[in-house]
Amino acid sequence: MSAAAQNEQKSLIEFPCTFPLKVMGAVHPDFEKAVLETVRLHAPDTEARHITTRPSSKGNYTGATVQVNVSSQEQLDNIYRALTSHELVKVVL
């Protein structure tokens, strides 16, 4: 099986698409800006209007949802890696 066929078989997502990334992180004044800047490294067309945030139920964390236009699994993987390695981010779903 070719590498392209294997990649197609692994992904259940049809590209290109708008993919909602759920990000949980620290309560910090720069959290939303940091998430947006990190996503923009791999998806430059992402704008502030594509992100929504809210505090966790106990107020210990901030949750963000970012609607990202992605064109490939590789691009999506790169965004996940960049976000999960950011110091303000705890979890990316």
Image: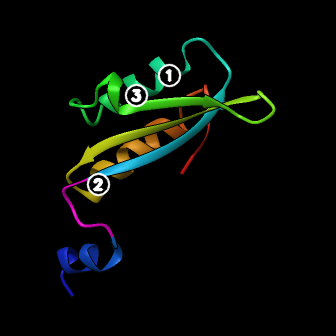
Direction from residue 71 to residue 93 in the image, left or right: right
Spatial distance from mark 2 to mark 1, Cα to Cα? 24 Å
Which residue, given by chain and number where applicable, does mark 3 sit on? 38
- Report helix, strand or loop for mark 3: helix
- Name the amino acid type tagged 3: Thr
Image position of 19 with respect to 29: above or below: below
Q: Where residue 14 sits: x, y (%)?
A: 24, 67
- Outermost residue to the bottom: 1
Q: Which residues are magenta?
A: 13-17
Residue 9 belongs to the span the image colors magenta: no
Q: Where residue 67 sits: x, y (%)?
A: 35, 41
User: Which mark is on residue 74?
Assistant: 2
Spatial distance from mark 3 to mark 1, Cα to Cα? 10 Å
Q: Residue at x 77, y 28 (%)?
A: 60
Label 3 or label 1, whichever comes before in sequence order: 1
* Mark 2 and mark 1 residues within 8 Å of each other at the beta carbon: no
Q: Residues within 10 Å of mark 2 (few under 14, many from 20)?
A: few
- Outermost residue to the right: 58
User: Which mark is on residue 32?
Assistant: 1
Q: Where residue 56 sits: x, y (%)?
A: 71, 34
